[in-house]
Structures are given as C-alpha cells and as structure tokens.
Image (cartoon, helix red, strand yellow):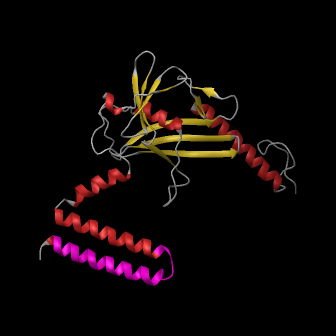
Amino acid sequence: MRVAEKAKEWAKNEIALAVKQEEVEHSKDHIRDYLISAYNFTGSVFNYVMDSHIPLSLFNQIFERLVQELPLTPIEDVPETWDPNPLESNDGSKIYICKRKPSLSKVVKADGSISYTDYDRVYCVDLKQPLEKGKEPYRIFEILQILDRMAPITMPYYPKGKYVAITNYISFNPTEEYIYLSYFVTPEKNILHANICLKKVYSDMISNENGDYVWWQEIPFEQYSKEIQIHERKENEEKWQSEGNITSGSIFGAGPANT
C-alpha cells in the first residue's frame, strides 16, 4: 500500500472516531451536525491533497496565508493595484486603498513623497495579560505608526506574517492610561526594540505631523516614569487611608499611623 493510501486510511479512521465521539457527546445538540460536517469536509480535502501529490507543507503554507489574509504573490506598486479614487487626509495627502489587500494603503504627500501602511500588520499583546485562546488581540493606530517608522513597508510587498507588539498597559483611573511599548516580534521571530512610552489623550485632542488627530501621545521616559510613580504613590496613600493605617498626608513623610 502506498504512503498516500496509508495516510488516507489513517485519516479516515481518525475522522470516524471523532464523529463517533461527537455523536455521543452532542447527541441532541445542534452543534453536532456542524462539527461532523467539518470533520467530513476536512477529510475530503485531505484525500484530495493526498491524491494530487501536493506536498502538505505547500498546502499548509497556502492555506495559512489565506487564513491570515496575506497575499499569495507579491503586491506591486502599479496603477491597477490601487483604487483610483483616493481619500484625502487633513494635510492634503492622498490615500490609495489596495484592491488586493484593503488593509494596505499608499500615502502620497503633497511634496510627492510616498509611504505605505498596513493596519493589519501588527497586533498588541500585554505583558500582564498574555493572549489567551479565543481572545482577540488589541490594536492601536499610534503603535502601527511607530512600526511604520522603524520598519517601513517597501515594494513589492509580501509580508511573511504579522508583527507582535509587546506592551505594558497601565491604568490608574478612566482618564489616566499609559502604554510602555517594549519591543516588536517580527514575523521571522526577531526582536525589534522600541522602548517607547505612550499616554492616552482625552481632552484637547492633539494632532500629529500629518494633521491627523491621535489618541495616544508619545512622551519621554522620564515623564512616563515620574507620572507612574506619582499615581502609584497616590494609590498607596488611598489604600492605607482606607485601611485606617494613616490619618492624612503622604505615607512618605506622613505623621505616625493610628495605633
């Protein structure tokens, strides 16, 4: 028996066992038919791949890129790549959306300079709350802008995967939020150090060099560190006061605690 036939027979047996288990565990559940169909369809695809002699590694590579909405061939900067009707930003730049990958755009500034951005190329993971199965990662536009500065997109564009921004999110109250962007993990699993501090802007919205409004403002590390210490000290004071450990003032240089 050929290797392909053995693999098909093995897969057929595994699927039969899985279907049998679903019939027992979900005998009266509407999910059962959906799961069984998924097993059977996957088995059919597996048999097709085996019969076509397509290397599984190639099939997996193609399938994985489609799942991640990554292009199968490089994207070229040619007229047919872009929607002919551009958007216009506050500074007069024209933004062309890619027809093949709508998350990718081409920015042509008034002076003729060109840059590219792909809002789907990076997602954020917090150090204190690692990404759990089934939990959606979060995205912040200003972190994408930082990545675009550090690792600009060039043409032809053929992303190997997504960047992961490793962050430390700190919130003291609904209007005092900070993010420390430690580093990016590249699709090749390399480290791209950032060490950038961001502070949430709630009032008096500011605009960046492009005239676009931003929610997160980059601040110096010294300012970030100082403000974090002030907020932590205040939280500690409030905690001690609520527990009756001090009467008033700061725990750093305050009067004696109640006895």
Query: Is residue 19 highlighted in magenta?
Result: yes
Query: Is residue 153 highlighted in magenta?
Result: no
Q: Is residue 77 left or right of residue 2?
A: right
Q: What secondary structure is the stretch in magenta mostly built from?
A: helix
On-image quarter of the C terminus: bottom right
Q: Is residue 45 above or below residue 36?
A: above
On-image quarter of the N terminus: bottom left
In depth, the one of 143 and 180 nearer the eye is 143
Picture quadrant where residue 122 is located: top left
Q: Is residue 80 left or right of residue 88?
A: left
Q: Is residue 53 left or right of residue 160?
A: left
Question: Which residue is rendered at x = 82% and y = 43% of the image?
Answer: 254
Residue found farthest to the front = 85
Q: Position of residue 180 (x, y in %)?
A: 55, 40
Q: Which residues are magenta?
A: 4-31
Question: Which residue is rendered at x = 52% and y = 25% of the image?
Answer: 89
In depth, the one of 63 and 193 nearer the eye is 63
